[in-house]
Amino acid sequence: MKFSGHETFSIREGWLHKGMKIVSDSPELLLDEEVADQLGVGRNMAKSIRHWLEVTGLAEGFGENKGKASLPRLTELGKLVWNYDPFFLAPGTWWILHANLVNNIESTTTWSWFFNNFNQDRFDRAVCLESLRRFLESSQKRIPSISTLTRDLGCLLLSYSRAIPAANDDPEDGAECPFRELGILTYYRTSGCFRIDRTQKVISPFVFGYVMSLAFPAAESSSKRSDVRLLDAVRMSGGPGRVFCLNGESLFETVSRIETTSENLVQIAGLAGDRIIRTPSLGANEWASLYFESIEETSNV
């Protein structure tokens, strides 16, 4: 379990593009202490960019290889993003990166816990922090200091929450994390409370398939199509209910909307109480490839 690496900085606009450009063109620079100058940020921010590239699944190879530092390289997902959406303009790109964080309990433990295990829709920071501490205590893992947990949770909440009312003089407004555009979390300044939005979301069928393949990989090789119970899709760790913050009703509404626009690529079958979600059995990178090809076709129209 890991609770650091981001240096308390959430992802900022343009950071991932800058980092991926260096990985693509001159990966050795990311191992240089002076890479901050190349990125145009402070030293701690440079460390944060490297962290986010790795935990979102865009780049790999930052570790040690038999005593020698291996050069960072783009993952298969990273290559797709760099080829089709290098400036991170497509909403689906951010949903995919968000899904990777939710499914990465070892490297982004707080993210995985918050979306998979924390079930309160309205909460304040203190309640959320105490719930995280109790979860870690029950898992019989070594619990980091409260200050470490506070910083990690604070980074998550800052990454996703939009404040109401917005403050024009907020110094963070100029550096908003793009994850806020997903519409997952709202922060009410007057009460100090947060609220998770459980209503239906507008999701690409290919991004939905990507998330399904992460949560239900066994179904990928069993047949040409995958059937998953709606209830399982709601509750499964890393599944669409958890990643997109949907309950049973809003997941059904979201999938029904996808079904009408995807030529039955994603379908709802069965009767109430026994509904299933039916998708082609494809791997996560196959779904990602279909998504990025689809946004290229749209941009060429």
Image (cartoon, rainbow, N blue to C red):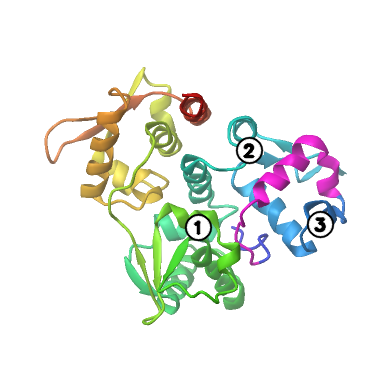
Residue 147 in the figure: left or right of residue 129? right
Give the mark, 1 or 2, whose residue is nearer the N terminus: 2
Q: Secondary structure at mark 3?
A: helix
**Mark 3 highlights which residue?**
36
**Mark 2 highlights which residue?**
86
Magenta extent: 8-31
The question of residue 164 being in magenta is answered with no
Residue 232 in the figure: left or right of residue 87? left
Give the farthest residue toward the top. Answer: 224
Give the mark, 3 or 2, whose residue is nearer the N terminus: 3
Q: Secondary structure at mark 2?
A: loop
Q: Nearer the viewer, residue 296 or 219?
A: 296
Quarter of the rendering containing residue 266: top left
Name the residue: 78% across, 56% down. Answer: 40
The Cα atoms of the two marked residues, 3 and 1, are separated by 26 Å
Give residue 179's position: percent from left, percent from top.
50, 54
Name the residue: 52% across, 63% down. Answer: 156
**Mark 1 highlights which residue?**
111
168, above or below 68, in the image? below
